[in-house]
Image: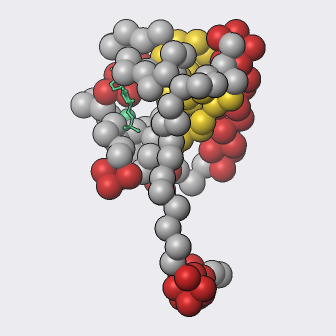
Amino acid sequence: MDNCIFCRIVKGEIPSLRVYEDESCIATLDIGPAERGHVLIIPKEHYADVTECTDEALLGKLMKTAAGIGARQMERLGADGFNIVQNNKEAAGQTVRHLHIHVIPRYENHPVIVAWDPKDPGQEELRKVYEILKD
Ligand code: 5GP
Ligand code: ZN
């Protein structure tokens, strides 16, 4: 996709700091890191988001790469853990419409970045949602 910023990064038209690359994906530093060492795993092929990608081998590869980068963040940057975050569509905070996975290193005593306020829907509501979502 000519006007896709991540396709342009993959092609080398926009410079990026790649910490890993193979035949199907790259891992590059995020230019707006949530934490020191925040990495994006980007498939070389364009898919707008995870719902468009039916390539199970690629999806597995992306997750395996993310896990490997997280381990590297702990080994080399001294991170104490990491979040794997993957946004799909604007409502979920996706700003770049090319499938990607965030690997965000986490450091003890830093504020929690990926968080939500747990709600108490009650058993009836949980059961209703269960009926809607189950196979
Ligand atoms: P999203 O919000 O779509 O899940 O994440 C998009 C991410 O891409 C953001 O964290 C943003 O900082 C990053 N980003 C946007 N433009 C560029 C760029 O040109 N280069 C790099 N390395 N990261 C980018
Ligand atoms: Zn793209």
Q: Residue at x 42, y 12 (%)?
A: 16
Identify whether 28 is placed above or below 121. above
In the rendered structure, the answer to whether residue 44 lies left or right of residue 2 reads right
Residue 109 coordinates in the image, percent (x, y): 59, 25
Q: Would residue 24 be visible to someone looking at this image?
A: no
Quadrant where the image shows the C terminus = bottom right
Asked whether 30 or 51 is in front, the reply is 30
Asked whether 67 or 105 is in front, the reply is 105
Residue 131 coordinates in the image, percent (x, y): 58, 88
The number of numbered badges drawn on the structure is 0
Colouring mode (rainbow / by chain / secondary structure / one colour): secondary structure
Q: Residue at x 75, y 14 (%)?
A: 75
Q: Would residue 45 be visible to someone looking at this image?
A: yes
Residue 67 coordinates in the image, percent (x, y): 70, 32
Asked whether 38 or 51 is in front, the reply is 38
Q: Residue at x 42, y 51 (%)?
A: 88
Q: Residue furthest front?
A: 109
Can you tell me which quadrant of the image ligand 1 is in?
Answer: top left
Q: Residue at x 50, y 42 (%)?
A: 114
Asked whether 76 or 100 is in front, the reply is 76
In the rendered structure, the answer to whether residue 115 lies left or right of residue 107 reads left
Quadrant where the image shows the N terminus = top left
Identify whether 33 is placed above or below 17. below
